[in-house]
Image: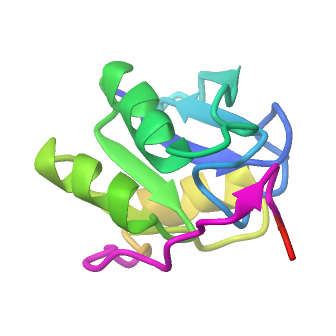
Amino acid sequence: MSIVISASAADLDAPVSPIFARCQYFIFVNPETLEFEALPNPAIGASGGAGVQAAQLVLRRGVRAVIAPNLGPNAFRIVVAAGVPAYQQQGATVREVIAAFNAGQLLRLDTPGADHVGLVGGRHHR
């Protein structure tokens, strides 16, 4: 059983990413053993639909929880429809987030975050 955490690099000591759908990596980790796999996010440069692509990707991997700072409306809808709980990140690194998850300290995401339309590569276009 694995959980997924949006991250800025490919290891457990990586900083967590401030944006789910356009993070650099998804870290799939077994929270009991800390075995993990870092997967580059193929949706990071999508011109649109990054939230949908990211949510579908992590759900296809059979995660039991999604951990992110927030989920945009489309990603949130897909994750909730799949019956997978989403939790708000707490901690500066992936390892800290796993510890908070294991301790039951993460808050459940019950509502979607802001729609990040106009983001490309994690940066606002003006």
* Image height of 96 relative to 22, above or below: below
Tally of marks? 0
Query: Which image quadrant for residue 35?
Result: top right
Query: Which image quadrant for residue 16?
Result: bottom right
x, y percent for residue 80: 19, 55
Based on the picture, tell me whether residue 44 belongs to the magenta stretch.
no
Which residue is depicted at the point 68% across and 31% down?
Answer: 41
Q: Which residues are magenta?
A: 107-123
Left or right placement of residue 100 versus residue 56 in this view: right
Query: Which image quadrant for residue 102?
Result: bottom left
Which residue in the rendered view is the most extreme toward the front? 126
Q: Quadrant of the N terminus?
A: top left
Which residue is depicted at the point 86% across and 39% down?
Answer: 9
x, y percent for residue 120: 78, 53
Foreground: 95 or 80?
80
Secondary structure mostly seen in magenta is loop
Which residue is depicted at the point 54% across and 31% down?
Answer: 29
Based on the picture, tell me whether residue 117 belongs to the magenta stretch.
yes
* Image height of 90 relative to 43, above or below: below
**Res 31 visible:** no
**Res 79 visible:** yes
x, y percent for residue 63: 34, 32
